[in-house]
Image (tube, rainbow, N blue to C red):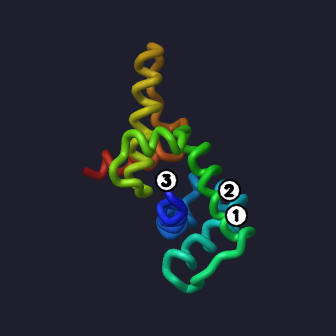
């Protein structure tokens, strides 16, 4: 993924989930990287220092770790590298892994699983 895709994912995450209790710890830890990515994506700031780029990159890496996917996974599988696609991919990857291991998939174990479960229940 390129830097603009990464900052776009983090920008969307901040706008959509900054007040969601499931992401509270993530947002607290990444309290600068998330809004910085948003400001960059919205062109409220037009240039980033090396430290700013590093901060957004670290926030993106933290997000990928939380989702339990790698950038390589995303590049190999997803044509659209956006927040929703990554979250759905993460959900299905965990679900398939648990099913293969013969475990029960518990939607309450991961923030994305809970969010997708809520979404599916509303449909």
Instruction: Give the residue number, with chain letter if any, for mark 2.
Output: 58
In the rendered view, would you say 71 is above or below 101?
A: below
Disc 1 packing (10 Å; few <14; some 14–19; many ≥20): some
Give how far apart the Cα atoms at labels 1 and 3 are: 16 Å
Instruction: Give the residue number, with chain letter if any, for mark 3.
Output: 1
Q: Mark 3 or mark 1, which is nearer the start of the sequence?
A: 3
Instruction: Give the residue number, with chain letter if any, for mark 1.
Output: 55
From the top left corner, tell me how far across and down residue 120 is, in percent.
Answer: 31, 46
Q: Which element type, helix, strand or loop, lies under badge 2?
A: helix
Q: Nearer the viewer, residue 20 or 36?
A: 36
Disc 3 packing (10 Å; few <14; some 14–19; many ≥20): few
Q: Residue at x 58, y 57 (%)?
A: 21
Q: Are marks 2 and 1 in contact (CB under 8 Å)?
A: yes
From the top left corner, tell me how far across and down residue 73 is, in percent.
Answer: 47, 38
Q: Which quadrant holds residue 117?
A: top left
Q: Which element type, helix, strand or loop, lies under badge 3?
A: loop
In the rendered view, would you say 85 is above or below 105?
A: below
Q: Nearer the viewer, residue 24 or 11?
A: 11
């Amino acid at each position: 993924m390129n830097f603009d895709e990464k900052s776009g994912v983090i920008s969307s995450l901040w706008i959509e989930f900054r007040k969601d209790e499931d992401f509270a710890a993530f947002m607290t830890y990444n309290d600068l990287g998330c809004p910085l990515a948003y400001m960059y994506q919205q062109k409220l700031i037009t240039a980033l220092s090396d430290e700013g780029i590093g901060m957004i990159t670290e926030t993106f890496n933290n997000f990928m770790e939380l989702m339990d996917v790698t950038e390589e996974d995303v590049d190999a599988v997803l044509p659209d590298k956006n927040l929703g696609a990554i979250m759905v991919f993460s959900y299905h990857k965990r679900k398939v892994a648990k099913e293969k291991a013969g475990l029960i998939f518990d939607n309450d174990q991961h923030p994305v699983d809970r969010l997708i479960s809520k979404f599916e229940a509303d449909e």
